[in-house]
Amino acid sequence: MDAIVQLIRNAMCCVKDLNLFAESLPNLYDPEYTSKFYTFPTPFMSKTTPLEFLICISQLYACISCTISGYNLIFGGGILKLKRLTRVSDLVHKKRLDKAGSKKKDDDKDDKADKDDAIVNQAVATSVMKEANGALRNVFVGICVLPIGMSFFWLFCNSLHITEAGWVGGLPALIHALTVMEIALVPLLYFMLKDASSALRKAVDIRAMVEKFSEKKNKDVAPSGGELSWINLDSYSLIVDSGWSPYWTTSAISNVDQDAEGKMLTKEIEALERNVKSSLSGDAAIVNASKAAEMEEAAQVSYLEGYREYAYFVFNFIAFYGYLLGVVVYYFDADENQPAAVRQLKLGYSNDDADWGGNFAGDFMWTVEPIFITSRLTKSKGVQAKKD
């Protein structure tokens, strides 16, 4: 839904930038036509055209949606999830101590069982740590998304000519809001590059795993160095239990008490132990032909995810640069008296041309991006339907 609204909002902004349909649909640019439905106060808000009114509605949606998303990332996907992961970590530690105590009473416990337990503990610990890192990142991303959403309020006011009237801080407040959005976008651009690199690296690792384990049995793959076996978190979720998603990776909102969560953890670990034991004791190939094909498909998906993130980075970097020019020309409003760095940043254009061109570039890139997103989602649903 957010992508569709973003597409509509920025497409309308592009129409306004280029003054499209001015002859075929003149009412779009006629404030008198707006007054037929609602009379805004004069002399400023009454200038609002139907097109600007439609844009302001979509900007208000972005304000509310991004603000809520930022809040949910900080708390639901961040702080509360970290709190839950702390509970899980404490329960895991308690379970290890209980098992260590029972081992002292059980002299028949063999080395193989100890190794299986170590593999399970390592997989659980790695998964919890991975989720904790993701939760910390969600907090940071939420801190960036929240002010972006709040800044859309001034864009909403600008479309209604409220800032022109000097209300809600006027034009300076609008520029400050744009500046906040630009600053908040910088870390998000970094995460886009990081996600792209991680996805491509994951694809390489999956293919390396296929090459290493294809048609080989447990006895053919001896542990080396500090390795316990060929099973770790990545290989388990790809080979043993495809798409493994333990309960602590889901929503942080949980009303269960500690005893109930302890039972959930016990059930999760027991399933993990069964799968590990079955995989290490069997004489079948670790990665057979069908599993290799499945993993190759997963690698291809990961490659596409990486290139998609690079595309998102390009779209958003151009938008970032374009909208930045609007802030720059506000503070350096004299064309004839500007530092060389500012003139280079504007690519030699005048303030008016740089402001218009940068704004249009941003609007256009943020129109293309949701088209890219929605087309990918449609394709993904089609692929999933074929699998089903």
Image (cartoon, grey):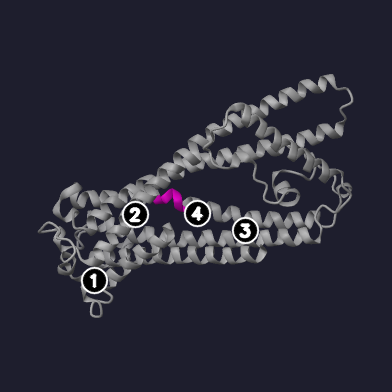
Q: Amino acid at mark 4?
A: Met
Q: Is residue 218 above or below residue 92?
A: below
- Provide residue 259's location: percent of width, then percent of height: 63, 27
Residue at mark 2: 61
Q: Amino acid at mark 1?
A: Leu
Write the residue at 28% across / 75% down: 20
Residue at mark 1: 28
Foreground label between 2 and 3:
2
Disc nearer the start of the sequence (2/3)? 2
Disc nearer the start of the sequence (4/1)? 1
Tell me the element at label 3. helix
- Provide residue 265's location: percent of width, then percent of height: 67, 34
Dot 3: within a 10 Å radius of its alpha carbon, few (fewer than 14), some, or many (20 or more) residues?
A: many
Residue 351: image quadrant is bottom left
Residue at mark 3: 302
Q: Report whether 264 appears left or right of 58.
A: right
Q: Do labels 3 and 1 touch, CB within 8 Å?
A: no
Foreground label between 4 and 3:
3
Dot 4: within a 10 Å radius of its alpha carbon, few (fewer than 14), some, or many (20 or more) residues?
A: many
361 or 298: nearer the eye?
A: 298
191 or 10: nearer the eye?
A: 10
Q: Report whether 200 appears left or right of 120.
A: left
Tell me the element at label 4. helix
Residue at mark 4: 192
Residue extent of the magenta highlight: 185-189
